[in-house]
Image: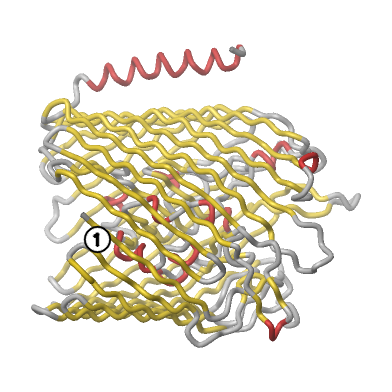
């Protein structure tokens, strides 16, 4: 074992011993029947805007996480053709300002500082959560525009459960999942295996476009185990393995085919202890992220790539001051390692630590207050002090007011710092100040909300040419983003009938303060909606999105702008026998020609059929 690795293992051992010793003084509030691994996510909903997509919502757009977020949120998804590299634009920011959070752990690439949505299968999770606005105090680097939460749960006292889902669609697309669960009073296990693949060879004849060499294939394995040692003492383990291949579509039949292979492994061991006024959750995590890029898919010697490893120690200690107020101390240590193969990136390691303090108070009638502060300590650059503050006010049963303020950041990635010929060790972290105000009105069947926000982002990291013409990473941009999000929902249920509908609209103005122009790939207008009607064992679904014109460059060039588009999907689902549901879905019902990235068109009308078995 290398000396650096020995030092890491020593640190892990002593930190584990110390924090677990503290845990002996912790214990439990009350017996619960579900282990929520990201225990902070539900708490932030008190003062910030969030949305939850449960397993039923996920199955409506099971083909990819890109589809799920595109049709069930106001996040603009930039997809380089169906199934290829895909990234979010959250409230006028870029992919680097969005944090991907797996069971409470930030999993953004340490190389690029972002995540690829199409390497994350939605079928791997019981819940996909979306937090709008900054959350760096809890979720770290990149949580500026928002965060996407991929959550697994472990239940007790549910017996044996199983699920089989199989989908077949146009372009030889196959999407499937096999899931098994077992739980009793003290033990829970959840096994999930899913596989997706597609020839993905669609055409858009009107634009002389063919998605050549765009096939993809991926498999994900998930295993979760929880054991209740006593009514106030629980252990859990969540692990995930992913292996996928994306072939990059060719814009010309004479182009050289390329592909990108990815393998990730994530493992998280946790210990929850709760009793009286004290509680503690301690977690040990190990994550790996490997990739291989082939500049010529037919030649093995064209391969380059990188490998990253991450060791995590994290403790969340809570003290209940009284019935209505509490203090949390969250301490985290990360050790990052990386290696590169035939790339211009230097091998690099990094130690980083953080401490955050959160205070929550519900002593006042109809008023909830929270405040947080955080300091990161990261090798190679100076990190800022961060804060968050929020208020929830409920003057009436039908009216809710939320106010949220925060300072957030994004740390420079390994590519930004260590890429030969362009990396910059003097980079500062990107910082953002945010304010958000939400007003929510409720009745028996209706819910209406309006959220306005403002963000001021400074020291955005960009790769720009220097005086020699060489591109290098530098802090240059000052971006201001402001906008409004409105949402209305209706839910009615009687004995045999149920109607659910949701319509949301977002206006986003995100301006480069130097150029006074809208950032690329940020639509001014976004509208999406879902409506479903269920009668006994039959269900009809209609969903749609409309995006206004999108500029694809920083100069607002009309020639390079993407046209506005509206896309609708429709589905019919029938429960043929109890626990067995058959579904047929038409995607892009009106045969719309559209694209979300310049040069790469998305499929026209296409079909899928699926069978969902629950037992």
Q: Nearer the viewer, residue 546 or 517?
A: 546
Residue tagged 1:
392
From what the image shows, is residue 284 above or below residue 89? above
Residue 604 or 169: which is nearer the viewer? 169
Q: Is residue 184 above or below residue 613?
A: above
Q: Identify which residue is drawn at 44% across, 72% down.
A: 608
Residue 432 drawn at (x, y percent): 52, 54
Q: Position of residue 531 (x, y in %)?
A: 31, 80
Tell me how the rendering is colored.
Answer: secondary structure
Q: SS class of the residue under badge 1?
A: strand
Q: Quick one: which residue is furthest to the left in this view? A: 495
Q: What residue is at 65 percent from the left and 38 percent from the top?
A: 414
Vertical side of 536 occupied by 144: above or below: above
Q: Is residue 3 left or right of residue 253?
A: left
Quarter of the image holding residue 254?
A: bottom right
Q: Position of residue 399 (x, y in %)?
A: 19, 73
| Quadrant holding the N terminus | top right
Picture quarter containing residue 134? bottom left
Residue depicted at x 27% and y 50%: 43
Quadrant in the picture for the C terminus = bottom left
Q: Residue furthest right?
A: 468
Most foreground residue, 589 or 228:
589
Residue 506 position in % (x across, y down): 45, 76
Q: Return the residue nearer the eye: 138 or 217.
A: 217
């Amino acid at each position: 074992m290398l000396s650096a690795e020995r030092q890491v293992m020593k640190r892990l051992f002593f930190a584990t011993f110390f924090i677990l010793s503290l845990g002996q003084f912790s214990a439990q509030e009350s017996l619960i029947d579900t282990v929520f691994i990201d225990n902070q996510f539900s708490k932030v909903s008190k003062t910030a805007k969030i949305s939850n997509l449960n397993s039923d919502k996920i199955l409506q757009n099971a083909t990819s996480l890109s589809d799920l977020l595109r049709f069930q949120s106001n996040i603009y998804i930039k997809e380089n053709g169906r199934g290829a590299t895909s990234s979010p634009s959250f409230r006028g920011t870029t992919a680097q300002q969005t944090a991907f959070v797996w069971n409470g752990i930030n999993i953004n690439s340490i190389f690029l500082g972002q995540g690829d949505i199409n390497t994350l299968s939605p079928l791997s999770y019981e819940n996909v959560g979306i937090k709008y606005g900054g959350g760096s105090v809890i979720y770290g680097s990149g949580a500026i525009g928002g965060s996407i939460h991929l959550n697994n749960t472990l239940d007790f006292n549910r017996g044996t459960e199983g699920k089989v889902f199989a989908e077949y669609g146009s372009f030889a697309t196959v999407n499937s999942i096999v899931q098994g669960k077992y739980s009793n009073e003290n033990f829970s296990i959840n096994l999930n295996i899913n596989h997706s693949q597609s020839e993905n060879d669609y055409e858009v004849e009107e634009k002389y476009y063919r998605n050549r060499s765009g096939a993809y294939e991926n498999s994900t394995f998930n295993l979760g185990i929880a054991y209740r040692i006593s009514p106030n003492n629980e252990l859990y383990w969540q692990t995930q393995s992913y292996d996928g291949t994306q072939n990059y579509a060719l814009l010309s039949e004479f182009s050289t085919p390329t592909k990108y292979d990815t393998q990730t492994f994530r493992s998280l061991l946790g210990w929850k202890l709760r009793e009286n006024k004290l509680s503690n959750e301690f977690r040990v995590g190990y994550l790996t992220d490997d990739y291989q890029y082939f500049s010529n898919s037919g030649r093995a010697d064209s391969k380059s790539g990188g490998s990253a490893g991450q060791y995590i120690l994290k403790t969340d200690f809570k003290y209940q001051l009284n019935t209505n107020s509490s203090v949390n101390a969250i301490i985290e240590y990360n050790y990052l390692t990386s290696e590169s193969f035939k790339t211009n990136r230097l091998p690099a390691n990094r130690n980083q630590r953080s401490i955050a303090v959160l205070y929550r108070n519900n002593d006042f009638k109809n008023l909830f207050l929270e405040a947080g502060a955080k300091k990161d300590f990261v090798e190679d650059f100076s990190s800022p002090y961060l804060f968050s503050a929020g208020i929830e006010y409920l003057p009436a049963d039908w009216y809710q007011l939320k106010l949220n303020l925060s300072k957030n950041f994004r740390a420079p990635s390994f590519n930004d710092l260590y890429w030969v010929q362009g990396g910059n060790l003097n980079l500062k972290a990107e910082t953002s100040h945010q304010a958000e105000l939400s007003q929510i009105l409720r009745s028996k069947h209706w819910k209406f909300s309006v959220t306005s926000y403002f963000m001021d982002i400074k020291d955005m990291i960009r790769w720009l040419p220097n005086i020699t013409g060489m591109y290098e990473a530098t802090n240059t941009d000052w971006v201001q983003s402001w906008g409004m999000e409105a949402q209305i929902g209706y839910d009615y249920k009687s004995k045999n009938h149920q109607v659910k509908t949701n319509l949301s609209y977002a206006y986003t103005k995100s301006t480069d303060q130097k150029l006074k122009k809208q950032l690329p790939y940020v639509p001014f207008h976004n509208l999406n909606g879902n409506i479903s009607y269920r009668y006994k064992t039959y269900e009809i679904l209609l969903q749609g999105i409309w995006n206004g014109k999108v500029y694809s460059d920083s100069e607002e060039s009309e020639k390079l702008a993407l046209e506005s588009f509206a896309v609708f999907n429709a589905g019919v689902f029938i429960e043929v026998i109890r626990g067995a549901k058959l579904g047929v879905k038409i995607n892009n019902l009106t045969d719309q020609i559209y694209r979300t990235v310049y040069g790469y068109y998305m499929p026209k009308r296409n079909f899928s059929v699926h069978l969902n078995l629950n037992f």
